[in-house]
Image: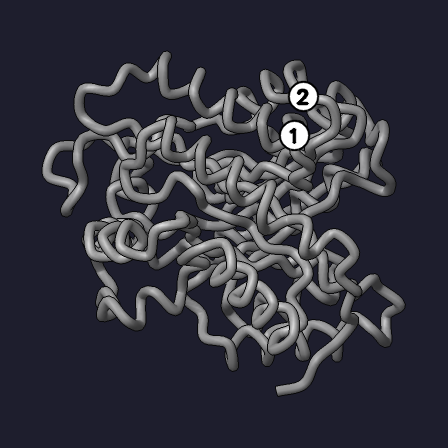
Amino acid sequence: MRFSKFIALVCPNGKDPIEKYAESLEQIQLADEVGFHGIWLSENHFSSKPGLPNFQGEIGITPKPLLFGMKIVENTRQIRIGTAVRNIVFTHPLLVAEEALTFDLLSKGRLDLGVGCGYRPWEFEGWKIPREEAKDRFLESLEILDRAMHGKPFSFKGQFYDIPEVSLVPQPSYTQPRPSIYLASGDMEQVKLAASKNYGVMSFSTSSKEHLINLYNTYCDVATPLGFNTHRDRFPITRQIYIHHDPAVVDEYARRNLPHYQAALGDFKACPPLEELKKLYIIGTPEECISQLQALRDDMGCTHVILWFNFGWLTHAEVMAQMHLFATEVMPHFASSPALSGINA
């Protein structure tokens, strides 16, 4: 199995953003050293707006994740840098394409460009974009982004953009025919689109096992006849994780983080009860975490998990301790885990 790390640079009241970036970079350097496959960086806007529901000050200080991504490239050896997600509704897709192509060149091909349309109401309000336009804007921007990243001349006329013939530079340097694209979606139609375009798909912990299996099987049904790669690594699942030797500490963490889970959903979805919430985590002792990951692999065919270690206002020391524990007592059990191609419900 592959393990990646999700980074949400959450900066609560009283936390120095300079210190937060430094701590996150140290965590990423550790991930690189112990063999994590990738880092996935969130994108957030207007997080300090007064009156946000259930949040303690800032909730995210990465408006331009690939700026931080270049700092990561300079301070790591091989770990891949992904965006989870780069919002292509709030930014002109040609600018996103130029950013990705430049990053591909400077990072020597270490980019996985995860894209999405956002869901937090205050971000749409800040950009003066109606939320009801989000899906149509996203689909139009995605088409422009994909065509532009190939580096060949093209033009486009749609509902939101009218682009004369352009050709972007730099052209794809290390990744052909363009840097890899991932859609962050649990929507069946968007998964079909991803499969038809040879994109990967990121799924999140709010989706049920049955839904995730159906999504992947549908992806394979569309992609396989087209000759596209359907390896399960291109369909990573995100999970919050908390690992500790003491079960009592694990239970206290779960109780403490119920409101943070609801806040992460934007405070407009129902928060699951404690026992249900624990099922959506990788949570427990090292032995329990191994068992839960084995279930993801054996029951769902999952071979790539994006782990959210710093979920719930944990200290930097707590995150580092978790990562060390996971790397020494969990990762070795999956070092030679067989890759699974497809799975049926």
Decide if residue 170 is on the left or right side of residue 243.
right
Count how many numbered circles sit on residues in the image.
2
Decide if residue 51 is on the left or right side of residue 201.
left
As drawn, 173 above or below 231: above
Numbered tag placed on residue 32 in the rendering: 1
Query: In the orientation shown, which residue stands out farthest toward the bottom?
Result: 345
Between 150 and 272, which is closer to the camera in this rendering?
A: 272
Between 18 and 248, which is closer to the camera in this rendering?
A: 248
- For the question of whether residue 168 can be seen, the reply is yes
Q: How is the image coloured?
A: one colour
Query: In the orientation shown, which residue stands out farthest toward the left?
Result: 51
Amino acid on which disc 1 is placed: Asp
Residue at the spot of label 2: 76
Quarter in which the N terminus is drawn: bottom right
Query: In the orientation shown, which residue stands out farthest toward the front?
Result: 246
Disc 1, SS: helix
Where is residue 111 drawn, in percent x and y? 70, 35
Asked where in the image residue 222 lies, by quadrant, the reply is bottom right
Please report whichever mark, 1 or 2, sits nearer to the chain's N-terminal start: 1
Gap in angstroms between the C-alphas marked 1 and 2: 6 Å
Give the residue displayed 59% in from the left and 41% down from the top: 327
Between 96 and 255, which is closer to the camera in this rendering?
A: 255
Quarter in which the C terminus is drawn: bottom right
Where is residue 306 drawn, in percent x and y? 55, 50
Dots 1, 2 in contact, CB < 8 A? yes
Disc 2, SS: loop
Asked where in the image residue 316 lies, by quadrant, the reply is top left
